Image (spheres, coloured by chain):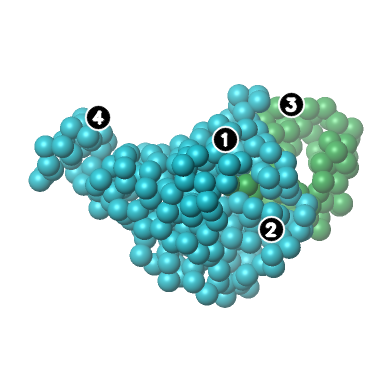
Amino acid sequence: MDFTEEQLKRYSRHIILPEVGGKGQKRILNARVLVVGAGGLGCPVGYYLAAAGVGTIGMVDNDSVELSNLQRQIAHSTRTIGVNKAESAKQTFEALNPDVSVIPIKDRLNSKNILDIIKDYDIVVDGTDNFPTRYLINDACVMTKKPLVSGAILRFEGQVTTILPGDGPCYRCLFEEPPPPGLVPSCQEAGVLGVLPGVIGALQATEVLKLILGKGKPLKGELLIYDALGANFRKVKIPKNEDCPVCGKEPRIRELVDYTEEYCSLT
Amino acid sequence: MKIRLNGDTAEFKEGLTVSELLRELEIEPRGVAVEVNMKIVKKKDFEGFRLKEGDSVEIVSFVGGG
């Protein structure tokens, strides 16, 4: 399978799994995954994907590392305060695994640039901290039929779902429109237990690897909700909405929408 | 009447609407999606949608942090 000696060692615990094997590990090495947000969720997602050997990881973030991020954003460090987050994550992931090429995208996604950015990737991971970008990513992935692994966190609760456009519901099937501006607080406003994005990000990375390998059952048509205080996981079925404005039979949304900034609380 | 609320059994008065249920639980209706028996209830129907014995209700909050 033309692995180097070092790769055989590095990925030995994967290769020994019948569901992965040499063939699966090759697929992982050839995979291209875009992680939107190099924050609480993006850090563990990217970290585990880098460890697994995902060959190309795009990290999108236009923010710089701040001291208040370090309680949960594990790819960054005291040393990288002030550095762009995508760049800081690149340094960490490439130090972990030289097989991985991390492409830092120091931009905020919008309706003009998103299609051009996601077209180079097989799978998109949503780890953003605001609703406008969350809806933008959902709509862009539906329109371009790109698999999307979506995660969200707040306080002690996390949510994960996998969206396979054309094969199951999308985010808008459950939450048709963004909440009114200011109604749902951000992590900055309401807090988040530092380890929570670790749990949710690890679940997202698991979903990504399953999609790459084509193994197991993707978390599609279901929202997995984790309540850290209750130590409880709950799965809610998401029915496909035939009237969904973006993935329904007669979609009303045919162009990408930039929701106004007021939708998004401070990042 | 007994309903299933987020997977657990709960007791409420007969004929409770989705709006009344949210009010009783002190949940802001604009911050959640509500599913009854695996069908999404549109926000505009919260007021008129009456729950009945044995219904399975899921209330899912908007969570947007990352």
Q: Amino acid at mark 3?
A: Thr
**Do discs 1 and 2 share a chain?**
yes
Residue A139 at least partly seen: no
Label whose residue precedes the other's in the sequence (1 or 2):
1
Q: Supply the letter of whichever chain is cyan.
A: A
> How far apart, in angstroms, are the residues tagged by discs 1 and 3?
37 Å
Q: Amino acid at mark 4?
A: Arg
Label whose residue precedes the other's in the sequence (2 or 4):
4
According to the picture, the residue beneath numbered tag 1 turns out to be A71
> How far apart, in angstroms, are the residues tagged by discs 4 and 3?
43 Å
Question: Looking at the image, which residue is at 45% across and 54% down?
Answer: A86
Q: Amino acid at mark 1?
A: Gln
Looking at the rendering, in which quadrant would you find the N terminus of chain A?
top left
The mark total stands at: 4
**Do discs 1 and 3 share a chain?**
no
According to the picture, the residue beneath numbered tag 3 turns out to be B9
Question: Looking at the image, which residue is at 18% across and 39% down?
Answer: A7
Residue A130 at least partly seen: yes
In this rendering, position of residue B62 left or right of residue B21: left
